[in-house]
Image: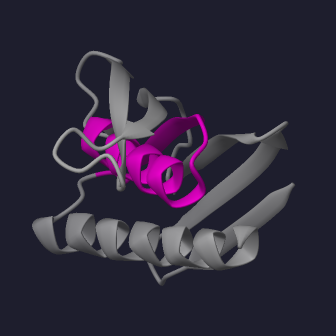
Amino acid sequence: MIRIEKTTPRFTLKMSIERMGQDLNVSLYGGDVAHIGAVALAIPHPGLQDDEKVDASVSLLCVTGHKEDELARDVSHTLATAFHCTVSVACGIHLDNATPQEINEILKVSNQLLAQAIKDLS
């Protein structure tokens, strides 16, 4: 299992990745209250425009009122195309009264965790 975390003055985000055979099961969570806000499942396939490239189809389940769906989608798609495997991502990040700048910081830190995950999985 891979566990990565990054702390800022306002929040901590954590990512855990467990290999399930060739596939990956990922959790991305943190802030004031960790939870499950969205779940994404990415399945790789040959690209529709160029079958030499890998693409992925992503299915999403979202909890009403939560906004983690695009983040879960992006993480699952990125990992599925990078490692040519099925990837599930459960994502839940809550920051009380988050400002637009703090939301951007959450996305920035999430991308840093994803980049580290790719290095650790390679």
> Is 59 one of the magenta-colored residues?
no
- Determine the image quadrant of residue 90: top right
From this view, report whether residue 45 is shown above or below residue 1: above
Q: Position of residue 24 (x, y in %)?
A: 69, 42
Q: What residue is at 73 percent from the left and 75 percent from the top?
A: 120
Would you say 60 lies left or right of 93 here?
Answer: left
Q: Is residue 78 left or right of residue 27?
A: left
Residue 99 in the figure: left or right of residue 4 = left
In the image, farthest residue toward the bottom: 9
Query: Can you say which quadrant of the picture contains the N terminus?
Result: bottom right
As rendered, which of 42 and 103 lies closer to the eye? 42
User: Up-down: is 5 above or below 60?
Assistant: below
Residue at the (55%, 49%) spot, across then down? 29
Relative image position of residue 38 (x, y in whole percent): 40, 29
Q: Looking at the rendering, in which quadrant would you find the C terminus?
A: bottom right
Find residue 63 and report its image quarter: top left
How many numbered badges does the structure rendering display? 0
Q: Is residue 84 magenta?
A: yes
Identify the residue at image location x=43%, y=30%. 40
In the rendered structure, which segment of residues is drawn in magenta? 69-96
Give coordinates of residue 103: x percent, y percent.
24, 63
Residue 113 percent location from the top left of the image: 54, 71
